[in-house]
């Protein structure tokens, strides 16, 4: 089955700096890669996703890149703000088979 | 409409007791997932239901865990003879597929915090 690894497990950045979270996956059939944000005590929510037919997707201060050859994808947050502090999960799945495999999470702390 | 709901929000039980957790998915969502999240840990897949297909139970940690879903509606996760290591937040999620344009976007419920004394 699919295995998703995520690094780092914790990340502290100064407000205004950029943050990068990296994930690798094992199943070459995976073609959908969502990222979820979980604020303290709250439920995970989708913040951005990317499909295998594109290499990069951007939404305001967040962007995701995908390298299918190397089987890794990354989340980039620019101009970080305190409200970006949360746990971020990457995930991978295969269209047509809905089981989603999550990474172990990255706790991001943005220091004001 | 309303999002995914779960009940109870908190459950404290004694070791050895059975517990039942409930999930109400978003109306019309064909897929339903259960995850376990231990304190400070990631999302551990437990079980997945898709319409009337056989559920994917590959993540259930032991035969003490079981889940049911009637059609495309409510699901219950049952843990028998609870152990202290079962203490965690149990999250339910649902998704709309294949009609969704966001592939497998999952909408999570608020979770049930289970504490086994």
Image (tube, rainbow, N blue to C red):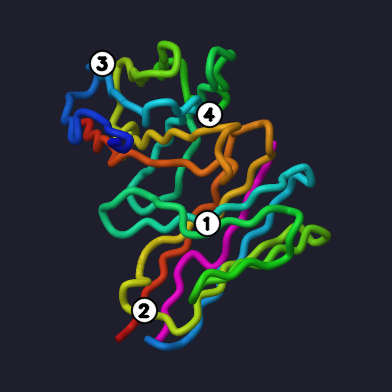
Q: Nearer the viewer, mark 2 or mark 4?
A: 2
Q: Secondary structure at mark 3?
A: loop
Q: Which residue is mark 4?
A: B59
> Which chain does tag 1 point to?
A
Q: Which residue is mark 3?
A: B18
Residues at discs 2 and 4 in contact (Cβ within 8 Å): no
> Which chain does tag 2 point to?
A
Instruction: Have a look at marks 1 and 3 and say if they share a chain.
Output: no
Q: Nearer the viewer, mark 1 or mark 3?
A: 1
Q: Is residue B42 above or below residue B44?
A: below
- Disc 1/disc 3 C-alpha distance (Å): 34 Å
Q: Nearer the viewer, mark 4 or mark 1?
A: 1
Q: Which mark is residue A110?
A: 2
Classed neighbour count for the residue bearing mark 4: other residues with Cα under 10 Å, few (<14), some (14–19), many (≥20): some
For image coordinates 33% across by 31% down, the residue present is: B86
> Which chain does tag 3 point to?
B
Instruction: Have a look at marks 4 and 1 and say if they share a chain.
Output: no
Q: Earlier in the sequence, mark 1 or mark 2?
A: 1
Q: Nearer the viewer, mark 1 or mark 2?
A: 1
Residue B66 image offset from top left, x and y in percent: 42, 16
* Residue numbers of the magenta segment: A1-14
Residue A109 image offset from top left, x and y in percent: 37, 74
Residue A89 seen in this snapshot:
yes
- Disc 1/disc 2 C-alpha distance (Å): 18 Å
């Amino acid at each position: 089955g699919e295995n998703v690894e995520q690094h780092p497990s914790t990340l502290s950045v100064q407000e205004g700096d950029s943050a990068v979270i990296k994930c690798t996956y094992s199943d070459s059939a995976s073609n959908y890669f969502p990222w979820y944000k979980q604020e303290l005590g709250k439920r995970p929510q989708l913040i951005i996703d990317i499909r295998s037919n594109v290499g990069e997707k951007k939404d305001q201060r967040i962007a995701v890149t995908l390298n299918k050859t190397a089987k890794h994808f990354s989340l980039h947050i620019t101009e970080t703000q305190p409200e970006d502090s949360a746990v971020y999960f990457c995930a991978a799945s295969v269209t047509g088979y809905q089981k989603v495999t999550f990474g172990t999470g990255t706790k991001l702390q943005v220091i004001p | 409409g309303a999002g995914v709901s779960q009940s109870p929000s908190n459950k404290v039980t004694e070791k050895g007791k059975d517990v039942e957790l409930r999930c109400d998915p978003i109306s019309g969502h064909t897929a339903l997932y259960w995850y376990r999240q231990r304190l400070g840990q990631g999302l551990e897949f437990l079980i997945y239901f898709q319409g009337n297909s056989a559920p994917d139970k590959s993540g259930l940690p032991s035969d003490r865990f079981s889940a049911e879903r009637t059609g495309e509606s409510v699901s219950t996760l049952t843990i028998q003879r609870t152990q202290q290591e079962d203490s965690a937040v149990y999250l339910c999620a649902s998704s709309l597929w294949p009609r969704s344009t966001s592939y497998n976007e999952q909408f999570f419920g608020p979770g049930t915090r289970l504490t086994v004394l």
